Image (tube, helix red, strand yellow):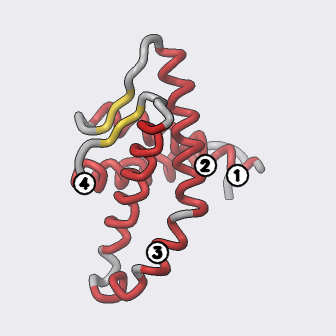
């Protein structure tokens, strides 16, 4: 349970940094508190997408992983971020992702920041 909470916090930090760096990833909303709550909800949604959808997509694209020598990893991460953005827009959460290449670079930033945060928080393995 603690590991999942650490992952959600890491994803929220990664999403915040990605929204700060890239114009195509953003949060809409009023106050800072609303944006923080939105980040946590979107991080939870991103975690659910990565937990349930990503293994299926990764399995179905296994030949492409081999063919591209692992570069398909970046494409799958971008697709998961785009899916999270789409679901967030459908649920009117105030989070959006515009463009595939923005999603690729945003997914890299989210992964890096999430990994760094999980290194420093207690309860992570």
Q: Earlier in the sequence, mark 2 or mark 3?
A: 2
Q: Indicate which disc, 1 or 3, sits on the residue closer to the N terminus.
A: 1
Alpha-carbon span between mark 2 and mark 4: 24 Å
- Estimate the spatial distance between the alpha carbons at disc 1 and disc 3, rounded to whole Å: 23 Å
Q: Closer to the camera, 94 or 116?
A: 94
**Which of pointers 4 and 1 indicates the residue nearer the eye?**
4
Q: CA distance from mark 4 to mark 1?
A: 30 Å
> Where does label 3 land, which residue?
58
Residue under pointer 2: 7
**Labels 4 & 1 near each other (Cβ < 8 A):** no
Quadrant of residue 76 within the rendered picture: bottom left
Residue 3 image label? 1
In the image, 41 versus 86, the foreground residue is 86
Circle nearer the N terminus (2, 4): 2
Helix or strand or loop: what does disc 3 sit on?
helix
Nearest the viewer among 93 and 23 is 93
Circles 1, 3 touching at the beta carbon (< 8 Å): no
Q: Secondary structure at mark 1?
A: helix
Residue 102 appears at what percent x and percent y? Answer: 24, 48
Please state, as top left, top right, bottom left or bottom right, where the C terminus lies in the image: bottom right
């Amino acid at each position: 349970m603690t590991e999942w909470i650490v992952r959600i916090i890491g994803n929220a930090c990664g999403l915040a940094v990605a929204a700060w760096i890239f114009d195509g990833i953003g949060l809409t909303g009023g106050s800072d508190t609303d944006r923080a709550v939105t980040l946590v909800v979107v991080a939870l949604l991103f975690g659910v997408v990565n937990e349930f959808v990503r293994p299926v997509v990764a399995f179905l694209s296994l030949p492409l992983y081999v063919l591209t020598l692992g570069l398909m990893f970046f494409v799958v991460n971008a697709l998961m971020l785009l899916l999270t953005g789409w679901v967030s827009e459908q649920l009117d959460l105030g989070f959006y992702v515009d463009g595939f290449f923005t999603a690729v670079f945003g997914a890299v930033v989210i992964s890096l920041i999430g990994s760094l945060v999980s290194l420093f928080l207690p309860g992570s393995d």
